[in-house]
Image (cartoon, helix red, strand yellow):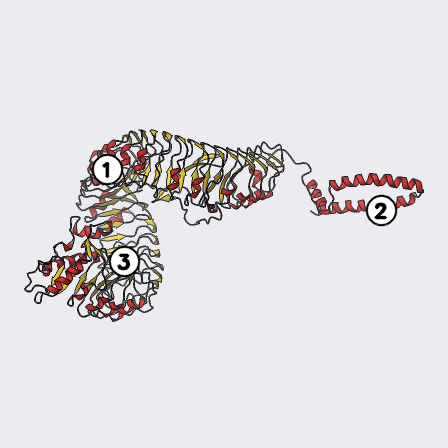
Amino acid sequence: MLLFFSFFFFLISVSSSSSFNDTHKCSAQQALDLLLFKQNLSPIKFSYDYTPCEYWLGSDYYPIMMNWNKNTDCCKWNGVTCNHFTGDVIGIDLSCGMLRGTIHPNSTLFRLPHLRTLNLAFNDLTDSQLPHEIHRFSNSLTHLNISGCRLAGQISREILVLPRLVSLDVSYNYRLQMQPYVLMNLLRNSTHLRELLIPGVQIRCVLPTYLNISSSLRSLHLSYTGLQGKLSNNIFNLPYLEELELSGNYLIGPLPKVNTSTNIPLKCLDLSFNNFSGETLDSIGHLTSLNYLDLSSCGLVGSLPKPLVNFRHLKTFDLSLNMFSGGLPSDFFGCRSLKILSPESNQSDGEINQGSTTASCVQFINLTRLDLSWNNFTGVWDFDALLSNLPNLQSLDLSYSGLSVVSNNSFSYANPDFLSLGLASCKLNMFPESLQAMKNLTFLDLSNNDIHGHIPDWAGEIGANRLYYLNLSHNSISGLPQFQWDVMEDLYLQSNQIQGAFPPSICNMRNLYDLDISNNSFSGVIPQCLGNINSSLEYLNVKSNQIEGPFPSSICNLRHLYFLDMSNNSFDGVIPQYLGNIIPSLSMVDIGNNHFHGSIPDVYKDCEQLEGLNLNGNQLQGKVPSSLSNCQSLIVLDLGNNRLNGKFPGWLGDLPKLQVLILKSNKLHGVIETSSTNRSVFLSMRVLDLSHNRFVGHLPRKYLQNFSAMKNVVKNSTKPKYLSAYGKYYSVITTVKGVEQEFPQILVNYVIVDLSNNKFEGEIPGVIGSLSSLIVLDLSHNRLIGQIPSVLGYLSEIESLDLSWNQLTGEIPRSLADLNFLGFLNLSDNHLKGRIPEGTQLSTFEASFGGNPELCGLPLAKKCVHPLETQLEADEDMRSGFTWRVVMMGYGCGIILGLVMGYVMLSTGRPKWFNAIVDAGEHMLHTRKNTRRFIYIGK
């Protein structure tokens, strides 16, 4: 920020100098060189990339070279400064000049031998490089600013041969690179260099243990340059450095110590967005000259720093987004010079009582911004008393801090400069009267409180038409005032109890970007005037109200809309063809659970941005429109609970990002076949619900084997991840554990396959066992036959398995007993038989096995006959080869052999020989019986 302001004043001073009444005109040759340079540049308008320029100069600013022509003295041209005595061009300042072009190596710009300052900042010089010819200015150039010009390539070594250089600014050129040796030479050998500003330029080097820099250097900005490793040991002890910015790099390790014996002149220190370690900030506590200190998102832990009294000049102190714990030290508020204090988003806790805080805040008389949000403090704060003790406060955020805020309904506080107030989740039970006096308020967040009843009428004029952000969501508000805000950009009223018609005053908010009135009791129709809102409206959420009528034609005028949610209302009629007007910009469309009928319009010719489409719960008929095949970014498609017919739209398999497909409860029919020539179909599929249709044939084995995203999903153990678009979560309704459930957020690793209530036949394909990340598998109410595949035991993550109401046979595989996460199992109404595996949680599923008369064992009442000994004998006989088939064969052979031997015996008269054979046989049988009894007892 300091850099921007200094640049602004420099711009004014240099530009004004060109208006001096010069004694000498510039030479004709230099004027010609400038005109030739102009030919390589063309005027453009400001875009969102150049908002700093528009902020400084205004949107009505015109291209700076408009008055450059051969008929006037070039010393009077905009942006040109000449030597007052010689007429030589010594300065060119075309910053924010609304120019586009290229700097060529042979540019006539390099023919100006006396040029001292060159400022081309914030023009569009896309892919230009810093030419080697820059060395031609070696005897004159002192200031070079090419920041924000979209330069690319390497900063050449010729930059080192500019010995007079005082200020070098190449910042915010994110495709520009600098070799580490160039940086180190600039730091060490540039004896006149005072400012080196290169944030955003890619250097990617490790800082040396000891940093050697020129004594002339005062400002060093190396943010977002890819620096790595630990900070140099002497980084805080450089005797002349006043500004050091190293944010957004990959720096690690503890912060180095400060030499307490010397006076360090460092005034600005920014180490934010790195990954340091350490529990204290003692190393920085001796930098007593600091007036700006930013340590946000540095990975720092431990207690919050002890008193700030050492920092007598400190104005900005940012400790946000770290992991500090514990309470605020009693003398934390001891720095009287402080203007901005931001310890938000930590893990700080402890009680902050009203009395001590009020007394401490008296010392903070200069404080303009206080942010304690997203912590775990306790205590009750009097809102009005706090404001009275901080008369210069312009921004206060206590949202989600753990503090409770009360108001005594006083509106004596009237700081005209108060701009921003955040009191979300502060247990506030009324609309504070103090807001009535905040005439310039621009930001107000009172969400997640207990504000109830009707908002007072005066609240519609808060901020005197300057309010651009208002969040009153998640309260118990029942009525709204008439809004008077023309500049409102974000309006959030969701999750209240607001009744009545859609507020017509919203139509006057011509700058509105986000509008959310969901989860209320609004009724009536969407007014036609909604289409009068600025076409830049991007987010519209009116779900879960009582709004009725046909699809609002006014919505189709919103050509920049990316999120539209009209679900859970009473809209009716057909979905119009003119929905195609806004399809190109839409990322998410949810009009589910309404009363739309007719066919789905085939308007998806240009839908490259569309990621989610939910038409669930209507009365739509016809086929799935084939133009959806153009939506290559589609992630979620939910067409369930309609009356769609036709065959399975196999061409959806060509959508490479499709993860959720729900076609349940329609009239789709036929065999599911692979219609695509692409073998890699449905690779990203995570949730597939085709239940309650009329599909026939075998289960789609070829599709199942392609479900790569259902195999070996890596779970995030620290923070759950949900499917979303632009920060908004997708939701679906599907059946889990036999009960239909709504998932307002879809976990990325929640994997579901539901093919139930169809007419599938044949066996369960073993390929399902490879879908190891399945959480829910439902194949119930089909005509499946054969045995339950034992490979289902490989579904190690499964929580719900339903195979009921089929014609499955055989025994229950023992492998199902090893599914540790299984919480729901239904195998009822099949033709299963045998023993239910014992000793596992299967015995706790009481209703899971009914309708299988040949099953036995717990939890069924039917006991298995000779459960243990019979099984062991059968197993032993199998191992020894003794089976009933062998026995019967032996009986047959024995009868024949007996008849033959009887005849021989009677004819030969030799009974002793026969008796010997019988004795030997009895001995063998006796030995086998004793062996079997020994094995059984041992077990």
- Taking depth in this image into account, of 557 and 314 the one nearest to the observer is 557
Res. 450 visible in picture: no
Residue where numbered disc 3 is placed = 127
Q: Quadrant of residue 873?
A: top right
* Pointer 2 or 1: first along the chain: 1
* Amino acid carrying mark 3 in the image: Asp
Residue 816, label in figure: none
Label 1: how many Cα within 10 Å (few below 14, some 14–19, many 20+): many
- Mark 1: secondary structure: loop
Using the image, determine if residue 588 lies above or below residue 195: above
**Rendered image: mark on residue 920:** 2
Q: Nearer the viewer, residue 104 or 887?
A: 104
Q: Is residue 274 above or below residue 900?
A: below
Q: Given contact means CB atoms under 8 Å apart, are the residues at marks 3 and 2 in contact?
A: no
Give left or right: position of 703 versus 341: right
- Name above or below for residue 219 compared with residue 520: below
Amino acid of disc 1: Ile
Tell me the distance, in whole angstroms, between the alpha carbons under discs 3 and 2: 103 Å
Report x, y in % for residue 441.
20, 43
Residue at the spot of label 1 = 533
Sequence order check, earlier mark of 1 and 3: 3
56, 1: nearer the viewer:
56
Q: Which residue type carries mark 2? A: Ala
